[in-house]
Image: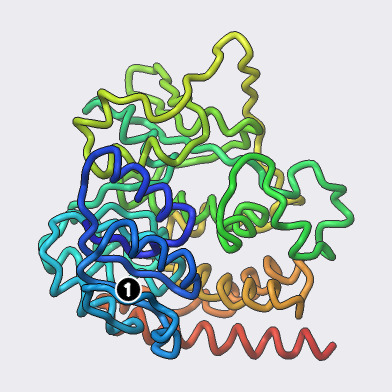
Amino acid sequence: MILLGSTGSIGTNALEVASHFDIPIESLCAGKNITLLNQQIAHYAPKNVCIADKNDAHKLINGNYKLFFGSEGILEMIESSHSHLLLNALVGFAGLKPSFKALQCNKKLALANKESLVNAGWLLQNADITPIDSEHFGLWYLQNNRPITKLYITASGGAFRDYPLDKIALATPQEALKHPNWQMGHKITIDSASMANKLFEILEARWLFDIESIDAFIEPSSSMHALIEFADGSITAHISTPDMKLPIAYALDKDKAAQMPFIQPLDIQSLCLALKNIDTLRYPLWNLKDTLLHTPQKGIVLNASNEIAIEAFLAQKIPFGHISALILAMMEYFDSFEFASLCDLESIQSFDNQVRAVSSQWLERKIKE
């Protein structure tokens, strides 16, 4: 298979699952963690390797592989790879073009890159995509071809679920990265704390399941991942140990996954499940849910401004509260944009660049205040 984002948490779990299934790794793509990538090259002997920065090439171990560089290199590597399966675990907008390239090359796309659907779901709606998010996997697992009334996904609440409300706005990266349940990369952990991640997942569900009636609750244990309300009035929930190996296994080979215990079963008697509404005072971004479902193309504004804000936050240039403040300001600024004009990758890329430029200017003014 082809694995994009091999050194991240999804990537390392995917390699472990692929080993269980005896799936050979033809191509690997990674960013700056060359030390881990070298270990993966030595173990899996890929035929193709892509790294973000050409200047890191001298750090790579020798091997019988073809080397690619940067965003264009990823697309070239996909095109030259023979594997039918591609897992896209890249972070951010950078994952969008590789998703399109995979589908253009008639590859099966296992998608962990949320931003592909957030930024261009209307162009990917009818594509053959297998989601890797635990929530969307849960929805897929439950649907069973019955008429659906409403979809629900759950949120952990992130690092600030129980944090003093008056201290959240000035919180630091160190505080935001203390996720209560999951071990994840920096960006998604901060997105969890702000609830941006759940907005991304709402938009993903909108395109994956072609339904606009979607909501979310906080479930503190992260044991219940998704619920479906059916037309007959019944509701079914997907409950499992919070472990990404389960959705990854089904994305790689659902027939084998159904026969193998990839996670520890939960102790049912010890479960304590509670669904709580998402408080918009604690998570002001949640106020955007309805407008995003009504005009999902606004996800481009959400994603671009969020990426600019998180970069500044991790660099300790802004406090946590500025993340939601920037996103809300950009959603208002671009409210009158003609979103129907976003009909191809070029127009999406151009608009994304525009949002990033305005977001950066807004932050610069805030930092100077």
In the picture shown, does residue 273 fall above or below 257? above
The spot of residue 350 in percent (x, y) is 38, 87
Q: Looking at the image, which is closer to me, 113 or 290?
A: 113
At 44% from the left and 81% from the top, the residue drawn is 59
Q: Is residue 250 above or below residue 204?
A: above
The residue at 50%/70% (across/down) is: 33
Locate the C terminus and report the quarter of the image it occupies. Answer: bottom right
Q: Residue at x 24, y 64 (%)?
A: 46
Q: Residues within 10 Å of mark 1 (few under 14, many from 20)?
A: few
**Which residue type does callout 1 highlight?**
Ala
Foreground residue among 292 and 143: 143
Measuring from the top left, give residue 123's x and y in whole percent. Answer: 24, 65
In the displayed structure image, the side of residue 187 where residue 27 appears, left or right: left
Q: Is residue 296 visible?
A: no
Query: What is the tally of numbered marks visible in this picture?
Result: 1
Please tell me whether residue 369 is drawn above or below residue 83 in the rendered image: below
Horizontal and vertical percent position of residue 345? 28, 78
Name the quadrant containing residue 116.
bottom left
Secondary structure of residue under mark 1: helix
The residue that disc 1 covers is: 340
Regarding residue 104, the answer to whether it shows in the image is yes
Q: Is residue 187 above or below residue 94?
A: above
Q: x%, y% of residue 145?
A: 21, 28
Q: How is the image coloured?
A: rainbow
Q: Residue at x 21, y 73 (%)?
A: 64
**Can you tell which quarter of the image residue 307 is in?**
bottom right
> Residue lying furthest front in this view?
62
Location of the N terminus by quadrant is bottom left
